[in-house]
Image: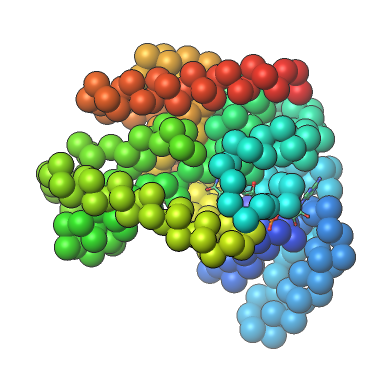
Amino acid sequence: MRHPKVTIVGAAGGVGSSLAHLLITAPDAYEIALIGRDTRSVACLLMDSESLAPLGRPPVVGHGDTGDFHDSDIIVITASVPLTAWAPRADSMSANAEVVHPYFREITKVSADWRGHVIVVTNPIDVLSGWLRRHTHFGRSRILGYSWNDSLRLRVAVARALGEDAADITAWVIGEHGDAFVPLFGHVLSKGRHVRVSARQRESVLAELRDFYTRWGRLGRARTTVWTTASGVARMIHDLTHGRSADWTASVALNGEYGLSDVNVGVPVTMDARGVLRVVEWGLDEAEHTALHQAASLVRQRVDGLGAL
Ligand SMILES: NC(=O)c1ccc[n+]([C@@H]2O[C@H](COP(=O)([O-])OP(=O)(O)OC[C@H]3O[C@@H](n4cnc5c(N)ncnc54)[C@H](O)[C@@H]3O)[C@@H](O)[C@H]2O)c1
C-alpha cells in the first residue's frame, strides 16, 4: 500500500526534525524523505527511527534528495541559515533565499502533472512562497506559506482576556507573518458563536502578543517555536493528504481577493486534498484593510527585490 510521501528539506533542524518525529509517530502512515545539509545529523535521525520498529509499524523513512520531489505528495521547506537570538524574520531574507534557491529551482522542474503541495516554513514565508509561486507553472492553490502559529497565539491571548478556554476560541491573524500582522478582532468565535472583544480586551491581547516576543528574545536562545510549528504543519499535511476540508490561514497568492493580486499574504482559506479551494473574503474594517494592503505592498516589494529564481 502506498503511503502519502512527505519530503522535508532542512530535516535535521528544529522544525524539520520535530515534524519528522510527529509524522513517524502519527496514526496515519507516511513515507518520509529527509533532506539536510547536515547529513550526519540526518543519518542519526534515520538510525534513531529504526529503533522505533518494535513499537509498531516500522517507520518508512529515508535519506532524500531533490529527486524525491517528483513523487512527493508534500514538500516542506524548513532549511534556513543559522538562527540568531532574536531578529525580525525579514532580516534573514536574502540569506534564506540563497539557501532555498536550489530546492526551489528543482521544484520548478516537477512535471505539469504533479499533484503535490509545497509548504514553505522558512522565513520570511510570504516573500519566499511568493517568489516560488511566481516561477512555477502550477497554480496558487499548491504553494502555501505556513502562518498558522500567529492565529494560535492570538487564540491563547484572546482566551486569557475573555477568561475562556483557548480550545473554545477561534480567531485569525492575516497579513504578513511578521511585524505587519493583522489580528481580526471582529471575527472571534467562542464555542462557534461570535463574541465581542472590547477595546480594553484588544489592548491586553496585543500587549500579550508583543510580550511573547519580548520574553522569547530575552531568553537569548537561537531557537524558534518548533513544537507549535511542527504540530501545525503536521496537521496541515494531514488535511492535505487525507482530504479533510478545513479552514486555515495560510500565505497564498491573491487573485483579486481583498483588492490584491499577484502577492502572497496570510488570508483565511478553505482547503482539502486539492489544496487551497477558496480564499475566504471577510469584511475588514478600515484599519484592517489598510494594514493588509501595507503588508502586501511590503511583501511585493521584497519579492521584486529577489529578482529571477
Ligand atoms: N512559518 C513559521 O511559523 C515558522 C515557525 C518557526 C520557524 N520558522 C522558520 O523555519 C526555519 C527553520 O527553523 P528551525 O528552528 O528549524 O531552524 P534550525 O536552524 O534549527 O534548522 C534549519 C536547518 O536547515 C539546515 N540547512 C541549512 N542550509 C541548508 C541547505 N542548503 N540544505 C538543506 N538544509 C539546510 C540546517 O543545517 C538546519 O538543520 C527558519 O527560517 C525559521 O525562521 C518559521
Query: Is 72 left, or right, of 102 in this rendering?
Result: left
Q: Position of residue 197 (x, y in %)?
A: 15, 45
Which of 277/251 is in front? 251
Q: How many marks?
A: 0
Residue 19 appears in view: no
Residue 237 appears in view: yes
Q: Position of residue 55 (x, y in %)?
A: 64, 84
Query: Is 188 left, or right, of 29 in this rendering?
Result: left
Q: Quadrant of the N terminus?
A: bottom right
Query: Is 105 left, or right, of 217 in this rendering?
Result: right
Quadrant in the rendering for residue 50: bottom right
Residue at 36%, 51% in the rendered image: 209
Which of 106/123 is in front? 123
Quadrant in the rendering for residue 142: top right
Instruction: Please tell me whether residue 261 is drawn above or below residue 126 in the rendered image.
Output: above
Q: Position of residue 243 (x, y in %)?
A: 47, 46
Residue at 63%, 67% in the rendered image: 21
